[in-house]
Amino acid sequence: MLIVDDSRSSLALLGSIVREVAGDNIDLCLNPLEALDRCDLYQYDIVLVDHIMPEMDGIAFTQALRACTRYRTVPIIMVTSDIDKAIRIEAIRVGANDFLTKPFDAIELKARMGNLLALRMAQVELADQAKHLAREVEKATAHLLAREEEIIWRLARAIEYRDGDTGEHVSRVATICQIIGEGLGLSPAQCRMIYLAAPLHDVGKIAIADAILSKPGKLSPDELARMRQHVTIGANILSNGDSELIQTAELIALRHHEKWDGTGYPDGLMGEAIPLEARIVALADVFDALCSERPYKRAWSLEEAYAEVSRCSGSHFDPACVAAFQSRWCEIRELMNQPEPLAISA
């Protein structure tokens, strides 16, 4: 408890009475400005303040204290010899909870202090319970997100195995997407979202025949048309998702083969009509595919793939994404040169 009164005799009297309720957990202060400084350092549970003081009166003190977040709900009692209704209304307006009129009765003071102490204890208990519940909710939410992310990574790796890869492709694409997002100045939360959603960009390939996926030669027009259906199939698989992660993955699955100049599929979207997440994945996916050996092609060198991405700026790829890719090239090259398979982490 804190008691603020510019009169030494009054302060001593109040202190002696309040100690019968609160024990020795009391600070006495003659100067209201010094009292405010103490409130910055300590968390008091009740503040008793005199109304008439020379440097700052009780109303101004109460108003200043209520401006501090930690003291928004702490009980404040104002001691006053003035029974003017206007003064009391002003005191209530700035945040006083109760009044004591001089000369005060010791029994009344102890009763009021006891009631307000009980109120304060209830406030603290409720605040502790709220913090505990918030921590539990946070833990449960984190657990659910971790499970969602794990399922996504495992499904993505299964798709890659079926497509003739061992799963490193989706890991590299996800990481390159995160690097490009950072290069574009996206927030950490946005970069993380794209990183987690990108692995499902080819989920629709689960419905494409092995003969098409593994064909060593050029696809026929019919086979190419069937292969291109993987984007709409993937979007259908991911449609109507409740989580932002699945909704983002749906966008990417549907739009990652659209091209900046409008010559892509399935709908020939152009420029910024293509979701940014899909524009980022389009670049990362093509770059890593160029660097990977497939049944129908050799693996390009990093320099060749870099040159191709740069050449396709403004046609296949968003120029801003290409610029971000180029600005972070050292990190991407280091990633691609890792001798061991990249560890997948949710």
Image: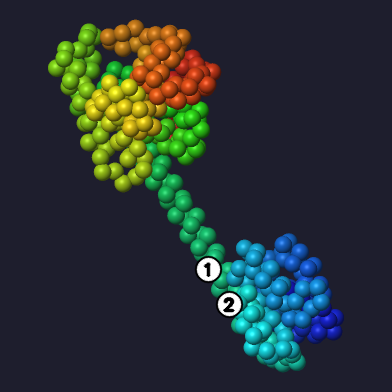
- Counting from the top left corner in percent of width and height, residue 146 is at 41, 41
* Dot 2 crowding, Cα within 10 Å, few <14, some 14–19, many 20+: some
Quadrant of residue 68 within the rendered picture? bottom right
- Counting from the top left corner in percent of width and height, residue 62 is at 68, 73
Using residue 284 as the reference point, say whether residue 120 is left or right of it.
Answer: right
Q: Quadrant of the C terminus?
A: top left
Using residue 115 as the reference point, say whether residue 305 is left or right of it.
Answer: left
Quadrant of residue 261 within the rendered picture? top left
Looking at the picture, which amino acid does disc 2 mark?
Leu
User: In the displayed image of the protein, which residue is found farthest to the left?
Assistant: 222
Q: Which residue is mark 2?
A: 119
Q: Which mark is residue 251?
A: none
Residue at 69%, 90% (x, y): give it.
83
Q: Which residue is mark 1?
A: 126
Q: Is residue 259 above or below residue 154?
A: above
Using residue 37 as the reference point, say whether residue 280 is left or right of it.
Answer: left
Q: Secondary structure at mark 2?
A: helix
Quadrant of residue 18 within the rendered picture? bottom right
Looking at the picture, which amino acid does disc 1 mark?
Leu
Q: Is residue 232 above or below residue 214?
A: below
Residue at 81%, 77% (x, y): give it.
54
Can residue 12 be seen here?
A: no
- Counting from the top left corner in percent of width and height, residue 287 is at 39, 17
Q: Quadrant of the N terminus?
A: bottom right
Residue at 35%, 28% (x, y): give it.
271
- Counting from the top left corner in percent of width and height, residue 167 is at 36, 23
Q: Is residue 280 above or below residue 6?
A: above
Can residue 271 be seen here?
A: yes
**Earlier residue among tags 1 and 2:** 2
* Dot 1 crowding, Cα within 10 Å, few <14, some 14–19, many 20+: few
Tell me the distance, in whole angstroms, between the alpha carbons under discs 1 and 2.
11 Å
